[in-house]
Amino acid sequence: MTEAKLPTGPKGNIIFTAAKELRTNVLGLIERHAKEYEDISRLRIGPYYYINVYKPEMIEHIFSDSQLYSKGRENANLKYLLGNGLLTNEGEFWMKQRRLIAPVFHKKRLATFVQQIIDITDQLMDDWEKRGEAELDIHAEMTQITLSIVSRTLLSTDASGEFMKISDALGFLMKGLSTETTKLIRLPQWMPTPYNLRMAKNRDILNKLIFDIIAERRATGAQNDDLLTMLMEVEDADTAERMTDAQLRDEVITIFLAGHETTANAMSFAMYLMAMNPDAAKRIKEETQKVLAEGPLTFESLMKLDYTTRAVKEVMRLYPPAWIIGREATRDDVMEGYLIKKGDTMMMFPYLTHRNPRYWDDPLRFDPDRFLPERMKDKPRYAYFPFGGGARLCIGNNFAMMEMQLILAMICSKYEFAVPKGFKLELEALVTLRPKGRLPLIVRRAI
Ligand code: HEM
């Protein structure tokens, strides 16, 4: 038997050799590495080794064992904010919570939210109608709509008042945490530095707001049609236990965070791609109008929006909001002849694998029909993984798909977009992939 070997990679510590590029052009850097090393590469950043995995079969190997490849180190930072919510939780506790929460995101229950999403999208289009043809920052518009949807479906509030306070505190904390991950020297979170004190203050604000909402629900026994009510009601099948307030807080903040920025980014890219590909936009419009001719949109009619669904998938192929997914090896492993050492950070990149010409013809072309079943059947399973994979697959993926199908279909049925002269889309790859700065598009009523 041949000895397992270490994956190859650039020499030196890239925190010194490519510090600037790491900060300013991380996508370019990883794209170059993927081209040079093809399936897998190993690089050193600071004290840690990062194993970049580009090959779908290897990605499958990592996703198939969530004990061996756990969330690990990078996650610890997020725990400060999300505690033991689903995204950051690990081990037995995670498994228990995942089992408990899975029914809340079951397709059947999601039907409850269709009308709410339709109403919120209609409201946005009413605002556009009043403005007439205009150049709008589509990223701001899409953030507004996904914030409204998460506030309504999670907490039965509108995106104002208390809800905006939650959103602001969370925005501050996330910004702090994502800058922190790029720092070479991190001071412990318990040290009373001005930064740490500001973070703690914002976390206290957030906690109080959420605990107050939970307390009010408990006091009034209100049974709203929202995710919070569903989360408060789920019971452990063996012990009949329900979630504590502290656990509810962690899950609520997690869903809030995981559930709106990703969809806002995907929808912003979707509208940009509609401007760039008017034929696709027209097909979505015609498909939606045909479905609408039979009656109002419902959970069932979503099934008929085939092309729109493929378009949503194609948007996330080119611009996956979760562009990078990390794991930590909890013990040594051998993967396709490569030695993985305990403590190595495994990096998987939907952004790269989705654009790799080995798996996708003419990868930069926007072509929703590449998701037709006959064109997908020979692809490796993890040539496409916008929602991750394995046991930790995004629990909100059906929710997200439903939300994005509805928004795209409704908007394309009435509006069209154009890119203002001279504008060139640039990307920002932080925790999520999003447009850099504003995303200006000319929005006008379709004829
Ligand atoms: C376009 C939209 C979305 C994208 C691209 C996305 C992507 C992802 C990915 C890649 C993961 C796995 C992360 C990992 O393996 O480390 C994940 C997990 C998760 N997502 Fe999403 N997500 C989206 C929307 C949503 C929505 C709408 C919700 C909730 C309403 C949600 C809730 C969650 C939760 C709770 C987890 C953690 C699951 C677990 O570890 O058990 N996501 N998401």
Image (spheres, rainbow, N blue to C red):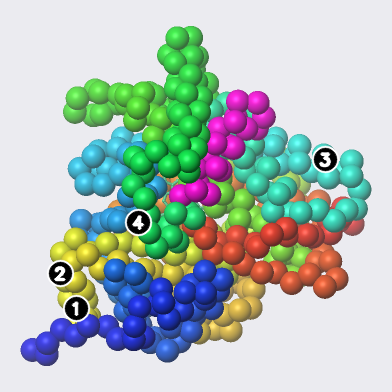
Label 4 or label 1, whichever comes before in sequence order: 4
Residue 74 is tagged as: 4
Question: Which residue, given by chain and number where applicable, does mark 2 sit on?
Answer: 332
Q: Which amino acid does label 4 sit on?
A: Glu
Residue 165 is a magenta residue: yes
- Mark 4 sits near ligand 1, with its Cβ under 8 Å away: no
3D distance between C-alphas at marks 4 and 3: 41 Å
3D distance between C-alphas at marks 3 and 1: 56 Å
Dominant secondary-structure state across the stretch colored magenta: helix
3D distance between C-alphas at marks 4 and 1: 21 Å
Q: What residue type is labelled 3?
A: Asp
Label 3 or label 2, whichever comes before in sequence order: 3
Look at the numbered disc 2 and give the secondary structure of its residue: loop
Look at the numbered disc 3 and give the secondary structure of its residue: helix
Q: What residue type is labelled 2?
A: Asp
- Residue 106 quadrant: top left
Residue 73 is tagged as: none
